[in-house]
């Protein structure tokens, strides 16, 4: 290849980009240079960071005798305070179900682009949504990711809208999401108790609640050190449960402001704190900023399931925790409005939450 060809930018039209990065790498198998739209202003090579030693918690202790239960609640409370992310093991969801879920997600992404584009939407609140990058309706640096999202619990509202292809997708996803929801409620009980609240406090705040599944597909990338699969952000809900296909790529920004890579232990879930839990705890626990890196060799697939309050509810700190702190640090805001603000921004990080906090401090 001549010098000129090597330095030439790859021209990828907007139309082609809307079909996603999976389609891009498949239609341009010789692509060895990252198209300039994907180059992100990164301070340093995102692939050069160290692994974090995040806490690993055996949550079967929550079903044990009171001493074991208390020490498990204590471990969860410390992990929430010190890390905002932890690994849970012995959670009771069979590995076979997690593998089946990964398989149907993989099959969904394997459909041709026309089948997936049926679910394409620029509306961030669309109950079922396929897309690429962050927000294709707005101009911004692109990310090396295709995604597919839909609501889970409460199932009666959207189950009929989930994909019918692959044929077993909706049944497998339903079983998976029901089990993850139950597991999340158990952890919310532990977190409530760890915060000194009644056991059922958080679950009650959630009302009917909302569960959102995000499946992310990161194909091999020609220059992975110049871009990201997903830019730094925090999740808007209370807790997100993440599993992946055996390929690492998640990174977190620790309290010391350093980025660390996170290893996923097969069969476990990574659990991370989102903005709603930071708000509810009146800032005792902080949502963890995280991002996804990509690599040159292997496709990475992750499945993240977020849990938050029902969309119509007004969110704010738990009153017993406001009494302790003296004043409410955040909100109130309708949860649905918060999601719209957070999801529509092309500059992520924790900007939405910081704006909510700043707004509140002006009122105090
Ligand atoms: O792929 C990952 O590891 C992160 C996914 C994520 O942060 C999300 O879907 O919100
Ligand atoms: Fe996330």
Image (cartoon, helix red, strand yellow):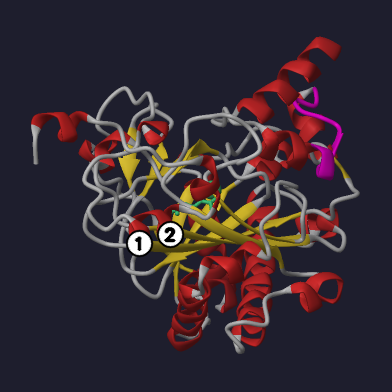
Quadrant location, the N terminus: top left
What residue did someone put label 2 on? 23
Which stretch is magenta?
327-337
Query: Could you tell me which residue is drawn at 66 percent across and 69 percent down?
Result: 186
Q: Is residue 80 above or below residue 108?
A: above
Q: Are marks 2 and 1 in contact (CB under 8 Å)?
A: yes
Q: Is residue 345 above or below residue 241?
A: above
Q: Quadrant of residue 211?
A: bottom right
Query: Could you tell me which residue is drawn at 82 percent across and 37 percent down?
Result: 316
Spatial CA span between label 2 and label 1: 5 Å
- Residue 290 position, x and y percent, is 46, 41
- Residue 16 position, x and y percent, is 49, 49
* Label 1 secondary element: helix
Q: How packed is label 2: few (under 14 Cα within 10 Å), some, or many (20 or more)? A: some
Left or right: residue 124 compared with residue 320: left
Q: Furthest-left residue in view?
A: 2
- Residue 128 position, x and y percent, is 72, 63
Left or right: residue 269 compared with residue 241: left
Q: Quadrant of residue 201?
A: bottom right
């Amino acid at each position: 290849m001549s010098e000129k060809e090597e330095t030439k930018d790859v021209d990828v039209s907007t139309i082609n980009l809307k079909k996603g990065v999976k389609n891009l790498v498949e239609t341009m198998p010789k692509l060895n240079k990252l198209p300039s739209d994907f180059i992100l202003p990164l301070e340093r090579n995102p692939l050069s960071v160290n692994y974090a030693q995040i806490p690993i918690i055996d949550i079967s202790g929550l079903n044990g005798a009171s001493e074991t239960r208390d020490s498990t609640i204590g471990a969860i409370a410390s992990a929430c305070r010190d890390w905002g992310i932890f690994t849970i093991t012995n959670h009771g969801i069979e590995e076979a179900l997690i593998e089946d879920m990964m398989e149907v997600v993989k099959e969904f992404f394997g459909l041709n682009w026309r089948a997936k584009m049926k679910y394409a939407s620029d509306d961030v609140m669309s109950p079922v949504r396929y897309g690429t990058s962050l927000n294709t309706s707005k101009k911004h640096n692109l990310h090396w990711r295709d995604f597919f999202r839909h609501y889970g619990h409460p199932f009666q509202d959207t189950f009929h809208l989930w994909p019918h292809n692959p044929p077993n997708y909706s049944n497998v996803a339903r079983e998976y999401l029901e089990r993850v929801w139950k597991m999340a409620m158990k952890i919310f009980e532990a977190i409530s108790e760890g915060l000194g609240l009644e056991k059922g406090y958080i679950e009650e705040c959630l009302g009917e609640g909302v569960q959102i599944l995000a499946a992310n597909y990161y194909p091999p990338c020609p220059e992975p050190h110049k871009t990201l699969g997903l830019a730094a952000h925090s999740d808007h809900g209370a807790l997100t449960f993440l599993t992946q296909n055996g390929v690492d790529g998640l990174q977190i920004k620790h309290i010391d402001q350093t980025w660390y890579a996170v290893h996923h232990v097969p069969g476990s879930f990574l659990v991370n704190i989102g903005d709603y839990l930071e708000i509810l705890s009146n800032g005792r626990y902080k949502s963890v900023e995280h991002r996804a890196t990509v690599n040159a060799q292997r496709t990475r697939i992750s499945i993240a399931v977020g849990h938050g309050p029902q969309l119509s509810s007004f969110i704010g700190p738990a009153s017993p925790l406001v009494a302790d702190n003296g004043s409410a640090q955040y909100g109130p805001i309708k949860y649905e409005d918060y999601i719209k603000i957070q999801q529509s921004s092309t500059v992520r990080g924790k900007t939405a939450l910081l704006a909510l906090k700043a707004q509140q401090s002006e009122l105090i």
